[in-house]
Every structure is written in C-alpha cells, then in structure tokens.
Image (cartoon, rainbow, N blue to C red):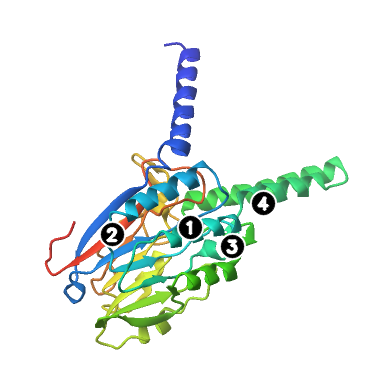
Amino acid sequence: MNWRTLFAFTAASAAGALLYAWAGERPRMTLQTYRIPLPQAAGLRILHLADQHFGEDNWIRRSRLRRMKAIFSTIQPDLILFSGDFLHNDAGLDAVEILLQMLPPARLGRYAVLGNHDYVEYSYTEFIGSAWRTVMGQRTPAEMMVALVSEGREMAKLLMQIYRNDRLRFACVPNNTSELRALLELYDVRLLENEALPLPEHPHLWLAGVDDPIEGSPNLVQALTAAPPDATIILLTHNPDLAYAAPPGRVAIAIAGHTHGGQVVLPGVGAIHTQGALLPRAHPAGLFDDLPGGGRMVVSRGMGESTPFRFRCPPEIVVIDFTKTNKML
C-alpha cells in the first residue's frame, strides 16, 4: 500500500467515523434499566430524564421527540425525575413543552432540578465569532497579528482544559430561565432548589434537590438538613460531583446527569471529556456505589448533547426499579 492509498483510506475512515458520530448514534436513544436494592423504596419505579439540551428545530430534535414518545408509552413510572439541562438555548423552549405534554402519568409526581445550561448556553459559535470580530476590528496589520496571537492563546487554553478534563465555562449566552420555570410549573413539575420534601405515601422517604454548582447557587447542606435525621434520602442533582460532598451515610442514592457519558468515548482512552471533576474518563456514567457512607448513584448519559457528536455513547432514558434484595442489574 503506497502513501496515497494509505492517506485516502485514512481520510475516508475519519470522514466515516465523523459522519457516524454526527448522524449515526445521536438518534439511537436507548432505554437503560437499573434494579437497585433500597428496601425503604422497594417496588417504586423512577423515570429519570437528563440533559435534553433542546435547541433549534431540526431533524435530530424531531427524531428524538418521536423516540421519547414511543419509549414513554412502554413505561409506567411512580415518579419522574429531571436532573436538568432541559435547554441548550432558548430555541428549545417549545420542545421542552412538547416533552412535558407527552410525559406518562406518575402517581408520586414529577420533580426537577436545573442544570448549568438551563441558565446559559456555552456557545462555540460566539466563542469563535468573538475572536474573529476582535481580530478583524483592529486597525493595522500589526495590531491584527497581536490580537490573533492573543485569541489563539484563548483557544489553546480551552483545548487544554478539555484535554485535562477541567470544568468548562466560556462564551456564556443567557438562557430564558424564567420561561423554563414557568413551563415546569404549568405542567406540574416541582422544581427543587436546595430543599427536600417527603414523597407522597412514603413519609420516611425524602427527595432532596440541589441547584447547579456552576451557574446556580447550590446549598447541599440546606437541602439535606431539611429532611429528618432518620430519613432515607434520594438526592437529585444535575452535577454528580455534588453527591460526593454529602455527609457519609446521608444519601441513600443520588440521581444525576451532566456528563453525557462523555459523548465521544475512544477505545483505550475513554471519554474525551466528562464535564466533571470527580468521575473518571473510563466511567463517566452508569451505576456507582462509592458515595460517602456506601450510598449509590446513577448518572445518565443524557438524552441530548452539548456538541453534535456521539461515539460509542448513545443517548438514553433511564428507569430505576427499587427492590428489597441485594441483586443489582
């Protein structure tokens, strides 16, 4: 094989992988079910919906809404929990309403916390566009070169943050959080903001919800101390990092999203970026049993994404069935 053939094969393979990551895996929303022992909640079924990241109307958004509707028709949950990031940007507010309209009944109610994207959009378009405007706004070639070097350093810094798996925050464009709150209230989704409440019919089973640690105002202590000392607590948080800050033994199970499972998971490398500080690249979503005091956590791969690519990490809807036994699936 000569170098031209090798180059052509490599380019075609890369293009095929990129096309698959953009259009092949993103519509393949799966249903993931966990059976978790929690005697105090035995028999309860939770429908966990995370990271919809709704934005502009397009083929992927329409495909996902159809897939959600089909999956919802097969599920009979007792409780529906949203772990945040309904929005990618304000163009997705109408899709949030469509989702809320198609939810299945849940006798114990619907509850939510907000994620960082429910407050702002981190816009790559604005990030690059702002750099371009800065460079082109200079008056002389020398000034343009200085600006180009400066903006190039900012882009390199962002790439380094991704490489180091640091928490990302850049080019923030505000989202209409007030409208999102109004939609949740309209469709009887109780927003939990650093608070806890007992679940109907289960006075010893409490649901605590905490605000997002990046764009919100989280107060985990306030949320947990609202429940009695002997309560069994389900913690709902957008960012799984917060669950590890709970006092040992205080949280029986945490339910989170935010990581998207890494979105792009490479063989031998793991997730390119987990969007969090504490979950490893090799395990950025799924079932965890390492919370302080032996608590468990379920982290969803999410239903949408922040960049339009998924590879070896399809979107998912999660169902959690609580059991009396110690057998987990």
Q: Residue at x 50, y 13 (%)?
A: 4
Relative to 198, residue 99 above or below: above
Q: Residue at x 47, y 23 (%)?
A: 12
Q: Earlier in the sequence, mark 3 or mark 1?
A: 1
The location of residue 280, given as percent across then percent down, is 36, 55
Q: CA distance from mark 4 to mark 3?
A: 12 Å
- Circle 1: is it few (<14), some (14-19), or many (20+) Cα within 10 Å? few
Q: Residue at x 47, y 52 (%)?
A: 164
Q: Earlier in the sequence, mark 4 or mark 3?
A: 3
Q: CA distance from mark 3 to mark 1?
A: 21 Å
Relative horizontal placement of residue 157, taking residue 326 as reference (left or right)? right
Q: Earlier in the sequence, mark 2 or mark 4?
A: 4
Q: Which residue is the site of mark 3? A: 120
Q: Amino acid at mark 1?
A: Ile
Q: Earlier in the sequence, mark 4 or mark 1?
A: 1
Q: Which residue is the site of mark 1? A: 98
Q: CA distance from mark 4 to mark 1?
A: 28 Å
Q: Amino acid at mark 3?
A: Val
Question: Could you say which disc has been placed on residue 319 in the image?
Answer: 2
Say if residue 276 shows up in the picture: no
- Circle 2: is it few (<14), some (14-19), or many (20+) Cα within 10 Å? many
Q: Are marks 2 and 3 in contact (CB under 8 Å)?
A: no
